[in-house]
Amino acid sequence: MKALLQRYRAEILLVLLTVGGSLLVYLPFWNGMGTVYRAWDGPNYLTIAKTGYDIPDGYALLGYVYVKSYYLVHLPGYPALIRLFSFVGYQHSMLLVSMLCSAGAAILFFRLCRDTWLLPQPLFLASVFLFFPPRWLYFRSTGSTEAPYLLFTLAAILLFERNKVGWASLLATLATITRIPGILVAVAFGLILLQRRQWRSLPWLLLPPAALSGYFLFCWSQTGNFFQYLAGHGDKAGSFRPFGFMPHLFELGLYHQVEYFILLAFVYGIGISRIRKFETVFVYSVLQFLLHINISTEEWPRYWLVMAPFALVVGFHDIWETREAKWLFAIPVVMGFVYCWGAIPLNGVMPAYWKLALAQLGLLGEWTPP
């Protein structure tokens, strides 16, 4: 036992940091965890986990989204995991899955830093990964797809780096049916395999688009529209050009936010440019950057989390490793918790709606008063 603890002490520490960080996020809500359970987008994914897209007539949350077809914009990967662990209760499962996937992602990131990218201080970099940026701390501690997506993506990259293309494609498939940017994992692998002339491995990369096409067929069976998922996100593609949503911010008088998004794109771009020697994550991050800079939404800080570990942590690893950065890292850590404590109560279903929704799902026994 002592030898095992010694051998895996870094992984054990990362698990403790993951769990401890999320528990600290929950601390102000400990006697009213319903506030966390109700935080978006958790209720939508829990609904799918329980109903399998068969939304009840008159369902309470339709008061927010109006049409049942809205739930088809939520891919099935995360709901399937919630259902898998639902023996602990659906609401508990929602958070448990996020926590387990976050811990697994941190361990995989550590292994990549240590064994594949050969970076100094891989344990510290993995610790940075867990708490930066603050939006990631929020989503890995609530009901959302970010944690399972990063787990599957990092696992796919690790396997691909070890030349296990078939298994890497399978994990890329899981990433794709969790968040649609996962399809770019397969595209990145394909470009690299083409450059390496590894023709025989290319057919494995048909798995992710095949799985996504299968889901689109399901959407067609439900609505008659093969591209219903994309139609549900049509507002984000309405101005498909770089910074396409900024004229709308000017119209609303939110010109201060424009500067923030410009700086965000600049920092991500610099970070990605600094990982060119890490071919797989560089190609992946470039593809994600080109896609997401053209998506018209103020949710850039959330959507860009798919490349944050590579652009913001690996890209600036030499800066993170300095003594000054380590001391100053306390600022985003502390303020990350402040951000979560302030944002969670403001971003959720109204208690009365959620209580009724749980009753309609047959889960009223899980209701937790605010």
Image: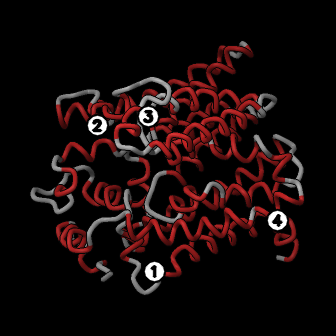
Amino acid carrying mark 3 in the image: Met
CA distance for labels 4 and 1: 29 Å
Residue 232, labelled with which disc? 2
Pick whichever of labels 4 and 1 is earlier in the sequence.
1
Give the residue displayed 63% in from the left and 28% down from the top.
Answer: 286
Give the residue displayed 57% in from the left and 24% down from the top.
Answer: 187
- Binning the other alpha carbons within 10 Å of mark 2 as few (below 14), some (14 to 19) or many (20 upward) gives some
Pick whichever of labels 3 and 1 is earlier in the sequence.
1
Question: Residue 223, position in %: x, y?
Answer: 17, 34
Amino acid carrying mark 4 in the image: Trp
Q: Which residue is mark 4?
A: 327
**Residue 270, quarter of the rendered image:** top right
Label pair 4/2, CB-CB below 8 angstroms: no
Pick whichever of labels 3 and 2 is earlier in the sequence.
2
Q: Is residue 246 left or right of residue 17?
A: left
Element on which disc 3 rests: helix
Q: Which residue is mark 1?
A: 29
Residue furthest left in the image: 58
- Viewport quadrant of the C terminus: bottom left
Amino acid carrying mark 2 in the image: Gly
Residue 87 makes an appearance in the image: no
Foreground disc of the pair 3, 2 = 3
- Binning the other alpha carbons within 10 Å of mark 3 as few (below 14), some (14 to 19) or many (20 upward) gives many
Question: Residue 161, position in %: x, y?
Answer: 74, 34
Question: Residue 360, position in %: x, y?
Answer: 17, 67
Q: Which residue is mark 3?
A: 246
Label pair 3/1, CB-CB below 8 angstroms: no
